[in-house]
Image: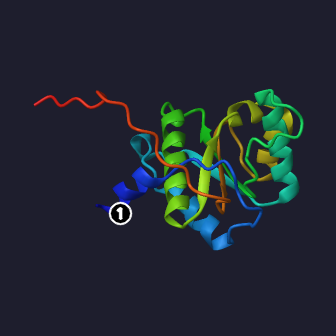
Amino acid sequence: MNEIIKAMKERRSIRKFKPDMPKREELAQIAEAGLYAASGMGRQAVKTVVVTNRELRDKLSEINRKIGGWQEGFDPFYGAPSIIIVLADKEVPTYLYDGSLVMGNLMLAAHSLGLGSIWIHRAKQEFEIDEWKMLLKKLGIDGEWEGIGHCAVGYVDGDVPNAAPRKDNRIYFVE
């Protein structure tokens, strides 16, 4: 089977991570893979922020938990030590699709390097909050950016889940 298709079939969302930080080189490769996602009219209007700072990661987790309505102490990032935030330029008509394609590339790249990942939502709501908009400004990211998602990345703690059976009647050929 083709390696890329095999990776697509084998990649799973991971909900338990070891505390060990992935190597910077691995995270850089994953982030770079996101740069190669297709984008509307080739605009490349998506940015990623790789968070390995534990304090910032934990603040992100806490605001995400509050937005999600979970009880105190729950970690919506499932213990992943690194978080890759995907942001898309709201001025670009295809921003949501472009950012989603980046997220897909990030998760496949992580899998290809033997790391686990999971797409965590609520980045949109986080980056509507002034505190998080200020973080972007501190990083030199100006303009109107929408949080598309968080790609939580780390080493898998335990077994990788099996794929759920695929539902029937979802492919149609018109010949």
Total labels drawn:
1
Q: Residue 86: give x, y in percent of width and height.
A: 63, 46
Q: Residues within 10 Å of mark 1 (few under 14, many from 20)?
A: few
Q: Secondary structure at mark 1?
A: helix
User: Considering only vertical position in the picture, is 36 above or below 125?
Assistant: below
- Residue at position x 52%, y 60% from top? 111
- Residue at position x 76%, y 35% from top? 126
- Residue at position x 86%, y 45% from top? 59
User: Considering only vertical position in the picture, is 91 above or below 52?
Assistant: above
Disc 1 residue type?
Answer: Glu
Residue to which mark 1 is pinned: 3
Along the line of sight, the residue nearer the viewer: 83 or 167: 167
> In which image quadrant can residue 19 be found?
bottom right
Q: Is residue 134 visible?
A: no
Along the line of sight, the residue nearer the viewer: 27 or 97: 27
Quadrant assignment for the N terminus: bottom left
> In which image quadrant can residue 87 be found?
top right
User: Position of 48 compared to 34: left or right?
Assistant: right
Q: Is residue 86 visible?
A: yes
Residue that protrudes farthest toward the left in the picture: 175
Q: Residue 129: give x, y in percent of width and height.
A: 81, 32
